Amino acid sequence: IENEMDKRKQCLEIEIKSIDMAIELGRLIRLQRTSIGLSPERLAELASVHAGDIKAAEAAKCVPILTIIKILAAVGLKISFSELRIKR
């Protein structure tokens, strides 16, 4: 069972490969969080994640994709890839 859980965790921990995308996503999360008056700690409570995950996402650190989805949902962000300003 533990081995199965490790496999699932690895599947969920999909690293955001593009640093440009991670930076832009972090910027959007921080902008939305501050515009609705939430601290990282309060957003963490709403998203059912750790405050460190919020800070890591905003700093473009590697965060599991499921955590990113929870954060986006908690701040009401609906983002498509075309909305992320990515330098190609």
Image (cartoon, grey):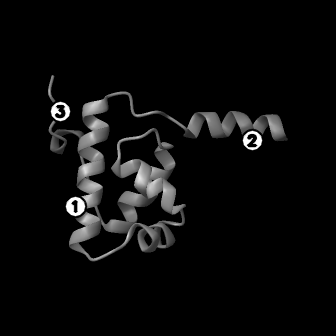
- Looking at the image, is 67 positioned above or below residue 45? above
Give the percent coordinates (x, y) of residue 18.
32, 28
Residue 11 to residue 83: above or below: above
Identity of the amino acid at label 3? Answer: Ile
Q: Which mark is residue 86?
A: 3
**Residue in view at x 33 percent, y 67 percent:** 75
Quadrant where the N terminus is found in the figure: top right
Q: Position of residue 7 (x, y in %)?
A: 70, 33
| C-alpha gap between disc 3 and disc 1 | 17 Å
**Residue 4: numbered disc:** none
Q: Position of residue 58 (x, y in %)?
A: 34, 51
Going from N to C along the chain, the mark reached first, 3 or 2, is 2
Question: Residue sitting at 35 percent across and 46 percent down?
Answer: 59
Pair 3/2: label in front: 3
Q: Is residue 55 above or below residue 12?
A: below
- Most extreme residue toward the right is 1
CA separation, marks 3 and 2?
34 Å
Q: Nearer the viewer, residue 29 or 83?
A: 29
Task: Provide the residue designation for mark 1.
Answer: 31
59 and 70: which is toward the camera: 59
SS for tag 3? loop
Q: For numbered disc 1, what is the local secondary structure?
A: helix
Q: Which residue is mark 2?
A: 5
Say whether marks 1 and 2 touch (CB < 8 Å): no
- The residues bearing labels 1 and 2 have C-alpha atoms spaced at a distance of 34 Å
Tell me if I can see residue 80 in this picture.
yes
Question: Disc 1 vs disc 2: which is toward the camera?
Answer: 1
Single out the mark in the foreground, 3 or 1.
1
